[in-house]
Image (cartoon, helix red, strand yellow):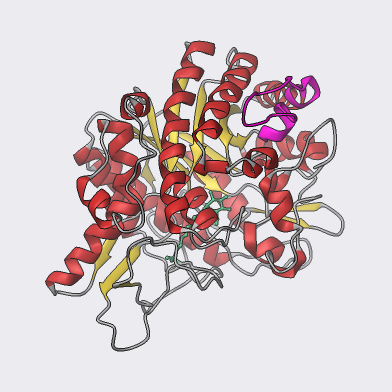
């Protein structure tokens, strides 16, 4: 096992927050317990053909029952913080498009106990209010294509913030609305599995609105808390030199980054994105006053980074390259980007097939610092899937450790160049339900044997513990 000392360690600023992250549907299981009703991911995972191996989150890591054991492991690793999400269908199981319905005390009690146990272990909770498990009843009434979903979200957010705000410092409204909108409503590789570009753009707007209304609700209910939003932003680049290649960068940057950043941070939608998507929608779902509601003060921007996005203009000659995480869908998540392709790059890839490029982390953080000076940044996810095996009670996941080391060094490069990054949450604490890939992809630093629920610390977990203890990343790994 590598350690952070000895090989020329580079220190992080004092007080840098070290954590790991998970999401409710990926780890909890207990989907029919204590009053929980189905979310869109229950429906989707139980639809044949949607998830690899027919896997579902019915049991997952059984974290709902084993959270004490899991917290003990976090404590053993010396982790300072844990980012988890609250399952909306546990909190208001009877929600409809018109009304939030009664609050389920048993659902709230689970998270309240989780928070208490974390604090007792000296671990700071960071709460994501929405990590993709929309109550199915809301999807049946239009889901994120309907503004009523955003209105109900704000009411739900207020309930959770009121219940936990005395002990939780950080509330993240949404996790990766890009995925909810484009993977859920355009490519259909995520729940609810719809393939309608216009619906995806309506979802973009109503997710932005949900963030704005939710942020205001959290402030009302928990005035002392920090309000955050987590985006999967991309460092979009091209290796092409044609004018059309630069235009492809602009378009993908618009749909992935600016269509979320601009309304939240500036109160406007990018004019070029509105123009690019005009054939799909006239954006009439944006009502007078919505942009002011979305443009709420933001205390922290959460950044999830895994891999770079490389684009090139497609001239229509050869078949279009689509190395952009379309999954097995015939439908692209990239609305109005028919003339853009995503070339396969040579070089190292993770088990997801995502290319590894730590420089993208640095470039992304520096761009955010440059364009939004003064905005506090938090890496709310970063990590990698590899095909791990347990041998004699150990998991020698050298590639994951290398990925983590290189990306932590990349975060530190940005910090040293002035980017105000205050913490890092590794994805993920446990191996878990990796959405449409089911349990076939392992992102954890803790291995889970799904047959026995046995947890095994991987070498990367032991290595991460040394990084956390030293508040430093080694300059290089031995060997
Ligand atoms: C996150 O999403 C989620 O928040 C989390 O729940 C999930 O388990 C975790 O990451 C791992 O997947 O094919 O090279 O162009 C990740 C969002 C969007 C990141 C698609 C990778 C495609 C990369 N992903 N993207 S590439």
Between 243 and 292, the one lying in front of the other is 292
Q: Position of residue 464 (x, y in %)?
A: 55, 48
Q: Residue at left 62%, top 40%?
A: 141
Q: Residue at left 12%, top 70%?
A: 243
Q: Position of residue 270 (x, y in %)?
A: 24, 44
What is the count of numbered marks? 0
Q: Is residue 190 left or right of residue 31?
A: left
Q: Is residue 403 left or right of residue 342?
A: right
Above or below residue 475? Residue 93 is: above
Q: Main secondary structure of the magenta part?
A: loop
Residue 294 painted magenta: no
Looking at the rendering, the stretch of residues picked out in magenta corresponds to: 87-109
Q: Is residue 426 left or right of residue 272?
A: right
Asked whether residue 469 appears in the rendered view, the answer is no
Residue 93 painted magenta: yes
Q: Position of residue 351 (x, y in %)?
A: 56, 70
Between 214 and 444, the one lying in front of the other is 214
Q: Residue at left 34%, top 44%?
A: 283
Asked whether residue 252 appears in the rendered view, the answer is yes
Which quadrant of the structure image shows residue 34? top right
**In which quadrant will I find the N terminus?**
bottom right
Q: Is residue 221 left or right of residue 103?
A: left
Between 366 and 134, the one lying in front of the other is 134
Above or below residue 407? Residue 123 is: above
Above or below residue 275? Residue 286 is: above
Q: Position of residue 213 (x, y in %)?
A: 45, 24
Which quadrant of the structure image shows residue 79? top right
Which quadrant of the structure image shows residue 35? top right
């Amino acid at each position: 096992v590598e350690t952070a000392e000895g090989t020329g360690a580079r220190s992080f600023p004092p007080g840098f927050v070290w954590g790991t992250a998970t999401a409710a549907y990926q780890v909890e299981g207990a989907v029919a317990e204590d009053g929980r009703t189905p979310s869109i991911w229950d429906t989707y995972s139980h639809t044949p053909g949607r998830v690899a191996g027919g896997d579902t989150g019915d049991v997952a890591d059984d974290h709902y029952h084993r959270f004490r054991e899991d917290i003990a492991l976090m404590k053993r690793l010396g982790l300072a913080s844990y980012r988890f999400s609250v399952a909306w269908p546990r909190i208001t199981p009877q929600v409809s498009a018109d009304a939030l319905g009664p609050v389920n005390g048993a659902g709230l009690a689970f998270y309240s106990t989780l928070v208490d146990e974390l604090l007792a272990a000296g671990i700071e909770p960071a709460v994501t209010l929405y990590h993709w498990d929309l109550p199915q009843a809301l999807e049946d009434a239009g889901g994120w294509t309907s503004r009523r979903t955003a209105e109900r979200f704000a009411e739900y957010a207020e309930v959770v913030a009121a219940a936990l705000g005395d002990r939780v410092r950080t509330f993240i409204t949404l996790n990766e609305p890009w995925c909810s909108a484009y993977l859920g409503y355009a490519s259909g590789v995520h729940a609810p599995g719809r393939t309608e570009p216009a619906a995806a753009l309506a979802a973009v707007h109503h997710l932005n609105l949900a963030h704005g209304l939710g942020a205001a609700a959290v402030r009302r209910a928990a005035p002392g808390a920090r309000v955050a939003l987590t985006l999967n932003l991309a460092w979009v680049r091209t290796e092409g030199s044609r004018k059309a290649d630069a235009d492809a960068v602009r378009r993908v940057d618009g749909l992935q980054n600016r269509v979320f950043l601009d309304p939240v941070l500036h109160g406007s939608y990018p004019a070029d994105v509105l123009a690019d998507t005009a054939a799909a929608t006239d954006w009439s779902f944006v009502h007078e006053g919505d942009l002011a509601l979305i443009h709420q003060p933001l205390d922290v921007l959460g950044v999830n980074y895994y891999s770079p996005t490389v684009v090139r203009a497609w001239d229509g000659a050869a078949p279009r390259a689509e190395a952009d995480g379309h999954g097995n869908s015939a439908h692209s998540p990239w609305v109005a980007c028919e003339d853009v392709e995503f070339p396969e790059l040579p070089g190292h890839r993770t088990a997801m097939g995502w290319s590894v490029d730590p420089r993208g982390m640095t470039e992304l953080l520096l761009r955010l610092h440059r364009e939004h000076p003064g905005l506090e940044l938090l890496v709310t996810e970063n990590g990698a899937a590899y095909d791990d095996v347990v041998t004699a009670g150990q998991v020698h996941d050298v590639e994951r450790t290398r990925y983590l080391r290189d990306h932590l060094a990349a975060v530190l490069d940005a910090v040293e160049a002035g980017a105000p990054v205050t913490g890092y949450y590794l994805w993920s604490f446990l191996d878990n339900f990796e959405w449409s890939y089911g349990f076939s992809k392992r992102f954890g630093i803790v291995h889970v044997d799904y047959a026995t629920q046995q947890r095994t610390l991987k070498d990367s977990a032991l290595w991460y513990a040394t990084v956390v203890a030293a508040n430093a990343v080694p300059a290089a790994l031995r060997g």
